[in-house]
Image (cartoon, helix red, strand yellow):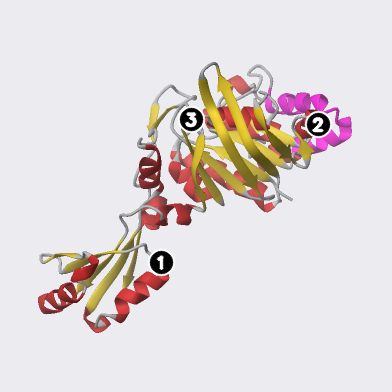
Amino acid sequence: AAAISAVGLVKAYGEQRVLDGVDLQIPQGSVFSLLGPNGAGKTTTVKILSTLTAADAGQVTVAGHDLASDPDGVRSSIGVTGQFSAVDPFLNAEENLQLMGRLWHLDRKVAKQRCARLIEQFDLVEAAKKPVITYSGGMKRRLDLAMTLVGAPRIIFLDEPTTGLDPRVRRAMWDLIRDLVADGVTIFLTTQYLEEADQLADTIAVLNGGRLVAQGTPEQLKRQIPGGSIDLQFTTPTALTAAATLLAATGATHDEDTLTLHVPSDGSAAGVQHILNRLDVTTVHELALKTPDLDDVFLALTGQTPTTTASNAADGTTVPNPPNSPASAADSEKKVLV
């Protein structure tokens, strides 16, 4: 059974339809990422699925509980980490976690053991007895996520969980999220960082104008967007000219200075093999596959570029989301020496 199922989800504020017939099927133990421009309805979707806001129409089940008839059952199965840390700044980590244990009505001994394990898991041992007001932004976010886990939920909603964190801390949070999924937890992720969705999500859906305009794995979405190519660097000008003539019908272009032929392609193995079968591969020095990244997908589907900066909650500075990070560059261009 799906961890989350939604059919025909509708929500309007006055004349504005924020959600207009959204359907979702999210498998257990997976990461589902919802992307969209500001105001697309991402946070509204999270609020509805987590019982914080009522939908105007639609049928929803979360962890097997009907959202309309059994909201308490839904709440007992989920955890929510919002865009801003929901921790008491004047308590320490232990006290914050134990407070959450009392809210879950956990046995005191069980709560103490669980809190100790979470403090160790989230690398907060040295700061466990210090007031949260002294923590960095990254430490506060780790504690915030740890508090979400006190009740051992099987589904967690993460709404912009790494906004404002520097790249190193963001990647540490990714590792924590991967560990949760490895334990069978389902993650519903909204994020403004497309690299984050690319790295973490099993399935990505793009929300625009209140409707889902695309859904699939990161690779499936990239292949829907034109702009990919096979770049072939040849050993001699003669070999380049011969290949350019042979593949002229594909719309291939060439660069005589670098002896490189750019052949439009979806990047699939079958497509690459089809091109290579037509060439004398002994004259090919290097082959590179270039595929559109999620920025290209987002722009093509929404007509907008994604947000690339976020306010750092820790020190008030602005942290850019690097468009060409090592991870994303590796995904968009794969080279093979022949």
Judging by the rendered image, the residue that carries numbered circle 2 is 70
Residue 241 shows up from this direction: yes
- Amino acid type of disc 3? Ala
Task: Please indicate whether residue 268 sits to the left or right of residue 139 in the image.
Answer: left
Judging by the rendered image, the residue that carries numbered circle 1 is 268
In the image, residue 207 lies at what x, y percent? 49, 37
For the point 15% across and 78% down, the residue is 242
Residue 40 badge: 3
For the point 37% across and 64% down, the residue is 267
Crowd tier of the residue under label 2, counting other residues whose Cα lies within 10 Å: few below 14, some 14–19, many 20 or above: some
Answer with mark 3 or mark 2, whichever residue precedes in sequence: 3
Answer with mark 1 or mark 3, whichever residue precedes in sequence: 3
For the point 44% across and 42% down, the residue is 194
Residue 203 badge: none
In the image, residue 135 lies at what x, y percent? 57, 26
Crowd tier of the residue under label 3, counting other residues whose Cα lies within 10 Å: few below 14, some 14–19, many 20 or above: many
For the point 55% across and 50% down, the residue is 203
**Which residue is nearer to you in this view: 94 or 9?**
9
The boundaries of the magenta stretch are 92-116
Q: Secondary structure at mark 3?
A: loop
Give the quarter of the figure containing the C terminus. Answer: bottom left
**Which residue is nearer to you in this view: 52 or 286?**
52
Residue 136 shows up from this direction: no
- Amino acid type of disc 1? Ser
Q: CA distance from mark 3 to mark 2?
A: 27 Å
The secondary structure that dominates the magenta segment is: helix
Q: Secondary structure at mark 2?
A: loop
Q: Secondary structure at mark 1?
A: loop
> Is residue 30 shown in magenta?
no
In the image, residue 177 lies at what x, y percent? 61, 44
